[in-house]
Structure formats: C-alpha cells, structure tokens
C-alpha cells in the first residue's frame, strides 16, 4: 500500500496535473480576440478573420484541460490510500483546468455567435 514507487508516481502525476493545467490556460488568449472579432464584424473583414482564427486556435486548451482533469481524478483516487505531498499542485492544476474549460466554452459560444450573425456570408 505504501510503496515508495507508487508515492513517487503519484508525486509526478500531481506535478503533471499542474503543468497541464497551466498549459490549458492558454485558451485565455482567445477571449480578447473573440471580443475584438465581435466588435469588428461590421468593419474590415481582414481584422474579423484574423481575430476569428486566433480565437479558434486558442480553444486548443480544451483537450489539455480534459487530460488534466482525468489525471487529477486518478491521483485523487490514489490519495485515499496514501498521503500526497504534492496535493496542492494537483488542486491548482485542476482549478486551472476548470477555468480553461469555462473559457473554452465562452470562446466557442462567441465564435458561434459570430458565425450566426455575420454579414460576411450574405445573411
């Protein structure tokens, strides 16, 4: 139950959870660009498309957030058997992943709104 190898693996997974959670926060970059695309949709099409594609690329943090949450759940299950010295790292990574998931949904909702109300497609 208290195998040092298992404890070390849990420690590494907790650190991995933090790193992946921080990487998933990259999606926060997309919100300002999605807002700019919303504001400039009636203006110059070049600015609209630039902001639109940057906001879509920044939604790439979504898979990292899901992976982080899966790792966090696995480590949490192992924490019931033994003490985890890196528990704050796991918790911080899970919080970052949840923020990134919410942010990704906001970006996707804004982009969907842009597509549905865009006059660039002749609507």
Image (spheres, grey):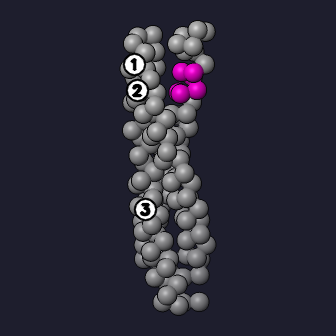
Say which mark, if any, is on residue 18: 3
**Within the magenta stretch, is there residue 55?**
no
Which is more N-terminal, label 1 or label 3?
3
Secondary structure at badge 1 equals helix
From mark 3 to mark 1, how far is it between C-alphas? Answer: 37 Å
Q: Residue at x 59, y 62 (%)?
A: 70
Residue that carries the numbered disc 2 in the rendered image: 50
Secondary structure at badge 3 equals helix
Q: Position of residue 105 (x, y in %)?
A: 56, 38
**Within the magenta stretch, is there residue 114?**
yes
Q: Residue at x 39, y 38 (%)?
A: 29
Label 3 Cα crowd, 10 Å radius (few <14 / some 14-19 / many 20+): many
Image-quadrant location for residue 35: top left
Which is more N-terminal, label 3 or label 2?
3
Asked if one can make out residue 72 in the rendered structure from this viewpoint, the answer is yes
Asked if labels 1 and 2 touch by Cβ distance under 8 angstroms, the answer is yes
Residue that carries the numbered disc 1 in the rendered image: 46
Q: Position of residue 119 (x, y in %)?
A: 54, 10
In the rendered view, would you say 40 is above or below 29?
A: above
Which residue is more in the foreground, 113 or 82?
A: 113
The residue segment tinted magenta is: 110-115
Label 1 Cα crowd, 10 Å radius (few <14 / some 14-19 / many 20+): few
């Amino acid at each position: 139950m208290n195998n040092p190898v298992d404890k070390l693996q849990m420690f590494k997974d907790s650190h991995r959870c933090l790193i992946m959670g921080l990487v998933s926060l990259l999606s926060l970059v997309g919100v300002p660009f999605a807002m700019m695309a919303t504001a400039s949709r009636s203006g110059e099409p070049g600015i609209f498309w630039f902001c639109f594609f940057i906001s879509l690329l920044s939604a790439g943090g979504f898979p990292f957030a899901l992976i982080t949450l899966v790792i966090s759940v696995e480590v949490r299950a192992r924490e019931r058997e033994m003490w985890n010295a890196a528990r704050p790292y796991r918790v911080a990574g899970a919080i970052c992943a949840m923020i990134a998931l919410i942010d990704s949904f906001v970006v996707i909702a804004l982009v969907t709104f842009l597509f549905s109300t865009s006059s660039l497609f002749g609507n």
